[in-house]
Image: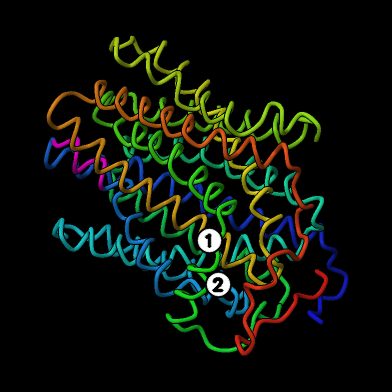
């Protein structure tokens, strides 16, 4: 049994998990959007390179998902969370070194992306240990809301830092905040055993990825989690080149929309409405407002479209709940890590595609193309998602698909949080 620190309730542990993740995301917001993209766009004037500086390093998540993801269930959660935050602090400090070549910058960001795939699996797997199965959607919603608030603050704070200090000064501030995130995780999280025994090996990662991908219901859910929102993030990657002086406002409105969507879906959408007003409709809402960019809208209209569209990101909550109903408990960290890695990889691919289209046409045209593609993919996946909803799901957290856990893999059931 995993032992909890004396006097520390699951709610307290969950609160510290949310705090650590929120600080971490706020740091990434300030550092990634307002600093790296500003530096690269100012140096090159290229929408493609600016987009890649923001989301391109996420392409490295596919490497982490291919070779490192089995570590998500085989590392102690607190130690892994603290160690990764400290690594990101050192890496962010290095990015602030004057005269650092663009190639070296992308190399550092790629390593961050690879290790980030493990961090996502560790963090979200820990959340499934802390929360009861029926409380996962609400808990994940609260985590998203905390992160959304910090994103809004991060965009505003990052914009101020870039203008008051310099992009490099803002990066150093971000590095300091990574240290804060490490301290929050070290002090606030209890020591827990890994969810699975044995050392992490690339072969285990490959086998488990293949088994998670083998069943059609899981494939449909993974594709719905990865592709439609990844294509819309490709639109977001062009905010800096679309409106260099007002990109912070666009990102802040996107964060406000995400916060509103997670609040409404996680706290106020009754269970019997989740299938009727579910993921396909929200994914279409995510893409549709971006179609207005074909008209090269004025800034107020663009801000409204971004805010409304970002409500659709809350479809991920419903899809994650569905995914958890299809995965055994001892593989939840790996399954959620595969989800986050695939999602971030798709975001990086979409940023590269959107940047390439913008390079040849314009940012507004590229955003319209990406939104159209997102809506088309959602329509293609809708039948499969509705079929699962009509069939009824297994309650989140149920140990289904036990065939995924082969003999000799050293996996064990998790104890109560």
Per the rendered image, the range of residues in magenta is 46-52
Left or right: 46 in relation to 389: left
Q: Which of 204 and 311 is in front in this view?
A: 204
Badge 1 crowding class, 10 Å Cα cut-off, few under 14, some 14 to 19, many 20 or more, is many
* Residue at the farthest right position: 7
Query: Label for residue 412?
Result: none
Say which residue label 1 marks. Answer: 120
**Residue 48 lies in magenta, yes or no?**
yes
Residue 276 found in image quarter: top right
Q: As displayed, is residue 203 above or below residue 112?
A: below
Badge 2 crowding class, 10 Å Cα cut-off, few under 14, some 14 to 19, many 20 or more, is many
Q: Marks 2 and 1, how far apart in space?
A: 8 Å
The image position of residue 21, as x and y in percent, is: 58, 55
Q: Dot 1 lies on which element?
A: helix
The image position of residue 381, as x and y in percent, is: 51, 37
**Residue 107 lies in magenta, yes or no?**
no
The image position of residue 28, as x and y in percent, is: 43, 50
Query: Label for residue 72?
Result: 2
Residue 67 found in image quarter: bottom left
């Amino acid at each position: 049994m995993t032992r909890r620190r004396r006097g520390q309730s699951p709610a307290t542990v969950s609160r510290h998990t949310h705090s650590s993740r929120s600080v971490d995301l706020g740091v990434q917001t300030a550092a990634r959007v307002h600093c790296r993209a500003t530096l690269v766009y100012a140096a090159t004037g290229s929408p493609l390179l600016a987009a890649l500086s923001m989301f391109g390093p996420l392409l490295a998540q596919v490497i982490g998902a291919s070779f490192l993801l089995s570590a998500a269930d085989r590392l102690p959660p607190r130690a892994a969370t603290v160690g990764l935050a400290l690594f990101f602090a050192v890496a962010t400090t290095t990015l602030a070194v004057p005269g650092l070549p663009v190639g070296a910058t992308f190399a550092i960001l790629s390593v961050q992306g690879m290790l980030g795939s493990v961090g996502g699996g560790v963090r979200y797997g820990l959340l499934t240990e802390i929360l009861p199965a029926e409380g996962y959607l609400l808990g994940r919603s609260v985590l998203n809301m905390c992160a959304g608030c910090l994103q809004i603050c991060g965009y505003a704070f990052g914009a101020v830092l870039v203008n008051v200090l310099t992009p490099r000064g803002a990066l150093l501030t971000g590095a300091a905040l990574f240290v804060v995130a490490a301290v929050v995780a070290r002090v606030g999280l209890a020591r827990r055993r890994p969810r699975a025994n044995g050392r992490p090996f690339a072969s285990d990662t490959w086998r488990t990825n293949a088994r998670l991908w083998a069943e059609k219901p899981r494939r449909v859910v993974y594709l719905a989690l990865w592709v439609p929102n990844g294509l819309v993030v490709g639109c977001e990657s062009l905010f800096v080149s679309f409106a260099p002086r007002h990109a912070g406002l666009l990102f802040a409105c996107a964060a406000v929309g995400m916060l509103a969507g997670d609040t409404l879906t996680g706290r106020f959408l009754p269970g019997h409405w989740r299938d009727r007003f579910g993921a396909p409709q929200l994914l279409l809402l995510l893409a549709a407002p971006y179609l207005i960019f074909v008209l090269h809208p004025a800034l107020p209209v663009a801000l409204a479209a971004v805010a409304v569209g970002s409500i659709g990101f809350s479809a991920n909550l419903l899809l994650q709940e569905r995914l958890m109903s299809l995965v055994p408990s001892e593989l939840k960290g790996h399954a959620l890590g595969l989800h986050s890695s695939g999602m971030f990889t798709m975001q990086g691919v979409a940023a590269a595609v959107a940047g390439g289209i913008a390079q040849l046409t314009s940012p507004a045209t590229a955003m319209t193309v990406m939104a159209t593609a997102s809506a088309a993919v959602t329509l293609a996946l809708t039948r499969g998602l509705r079929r699962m909803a009509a069939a009824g799901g297994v309650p989140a957290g149920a140990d289904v698909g036990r065939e995924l856990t082969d003999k000799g893999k050293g996996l064990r059931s998790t104890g109560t949080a």
